[in-house]
Amino acid sequence: MTHSSILTAAGLDLSDLSGGSLAVHTPIDGSEIARLAETRADDMSAVIARAQAAFRHWRTVPAPRRGELVRLLGEELRAAKAELGAVVSLEVGKITSEGLGEVQEMIDICDFALGLSRQLYGLTIASERPGHRMAETWHPMGPVGIISAFNFPVAVWSWNAAIALVCGNPIIWKPSEKSPLTAMAAHRCLERALARFGDAPEGLSQLVIGGPEIGAALVESRDVPVLSATGSTRMGNIVGPKVLARWGRPILELGGNNAMIVAPSADLDMAVRAIVFSAVGTAGQRCTSLRRLIVHESIHDDLVAKLKSAYASLPVGDPRESGTLVGPLVDEQARTRMLAQLEQARSEGGVVHGGEAVEDGVPQGGAYVTPALVEMPDQTDTVRTETFAPILYVMRYSSLEDAIAMQNDVPQGLSSCIFTLNLREAETFLSAAGADCGIANVNIGPSGAEIGGAFGGEKETGGGRESGSDAWKGYMRRQTSTINYSAELPLAQGVRFDI
Ligand code: UN1
């Protein structure tokens, strides 16, 4: 299929894809596949006003009816799964199976949100006063701004969109400048669902295309009470304080520097498979990608030998070809950064295996690399830095306590895991004295989380939670009510104030 036919098959109109100022390239061969018109910064106040108007209506629609919209979105996504997955592969370079997996993640969150639309439960609370009842009710917040990253160009939007919509909030989406086409194709699915739904207010979901000034309008507006942003810690450092300064609620999903501890009892064959998927899958460009391997000294050499042989046979190439496991990096800049980081690691005593630019047997113009395994003497500053590329630093440990201390001794706190068959070790890792991350797994890798759990992390990862569990509470406001059905007016805490 040509680049254009992939885009038209996903419902995009080629006449909308040219003549604008935002050039979009495919990482597969670096060629330009669209030139999009951008939303003007001046238009953002009208966009936000439309969302506010939609909010006044949508908040009064019963939540289970709002769930119907998300059910229809799930249907549209099921129907368009192959076509949308192909745009993910074209625009961000994911292998076919991961492109499809991304759309499946969207379908899953729609199913979750549909069930949730009948389960936005509050509490009833025992009152200390006779003839009184206390209750907690969850209400919609208002427009939710969603700033998404290129690496999960549509799944992370859908976590926010599906939950925000059932919670009664309009959405305004600013995708990464690197992945606006996937966003447009996904938004078409929502538009089709909206048409079938029938009576949703105009402006319930809006897509804005452009750079940081468009995002800044969302970040700075008091009429966007919730701002969910996925991206670098540098971006979060700007966005978070600005949203807080105007008393908004940020939901931040920022950098990760995820580790795996491999203990002496680990099933090494399973560990190798988990390591390779999580370090090399998506070309190391997941927030959850495995970046640090902390291996017990007794099995270190054995594991490194197994990994070296697994890495040697990894098929690098066109992500659309069956058999390819490692597609391109998103752009040349990402490759330059990866190679520079490896140089830095070498200067700190690292021994690098792989980590080379690939030009043969791959489409020309793409930034292809062989994944890198780097044996490090220590956890240096380079290891503590997140590089969005397939670099796996391998270090040794002798006691579990040291391994956990190393796992925690980075600024980020997204995902973590341990491979062990020892119950004491596994439970220690999961305990209050264990991993300090938002996600901590046993005998699986750090990436590929299911939507049913809350997703997010601590420290420089930003503290936000999205997706499953009770992350929906971040999209609603809690109201505590005390209802007096007696004929008396007793005061709490026994206070007397007789007049
Ligand atoms: C991200 O990289 O921003 O857990 C999200 C995972 C995916 C989501 C990653 N389900 O790897």
Image: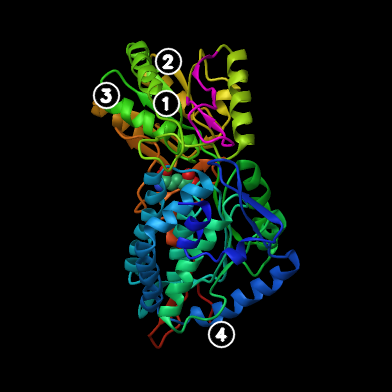
Q: Earlier in the sequence, mark 2 or mark 3?
A: 3
**Quick one: SS at disc 4?**
loop
Mark whose residue sits in front, 4 or 1 = 1
Q: Earlier in the sequence, mark 1 or mark 2?
A: 2
Q: How much space separates mark 1 and mark 2, taking CA atoms?
A: 12 Å
Q: Amino acid at mark 4?
A: Ile
Colouring: rainbow
| Residue depicted at 41% across the width and 79% down the height | 196
Q: How much space separates mark 3 and mark 4, taking CA atoms?
A: 78 Å
Q: Position of residue 286 (x, y in %)?
A: 48, 40
Of the four image quadrants, the one with ligand 1 is top left
In contact (CB < 8 Å): disc 2 and disc 4? no
Q: Position of residue 131 (x, y in %)?
A: 35, 81
Q: Amino acid at mark 1?
A: Ile
Q: Quadrant of residue 340?
A: top right
Q: Nearer the viewer, residue 38 or 13?
A: 13
* Residue wearing tag 1: 404
* Residue wearing tag 2: 396
Q: How much space separates mark 4 and mark 1, taking CA atoms?
A: 62 Å
* Residue wearing tag 4: 499
Above or below: residue 244 compared with residue 11: above
Q: Amino acid at mark 3?
A: Asp
- Magenta segment: 350-371
* Residue wearing tag 3: 269
Give the total of numbered labels.
4
Mark whose residue sits in front, 2 or 4 = 2
User: In this view of the protein, can residue 225 be seen by the observer?
Assistant: no
Task: Categorize mark 4 by other alpha carbons within 10 Å: few (<14), some (14-19), many (20+).
Answer: few
Q: Earlier in the sequence, mark 2 or mark 4?
A: 2
In contact (CB < 8 Å): disc 4 and disc 1? no
Q: Earlier in the sequence, mark 1 or mark 3?
A: 3
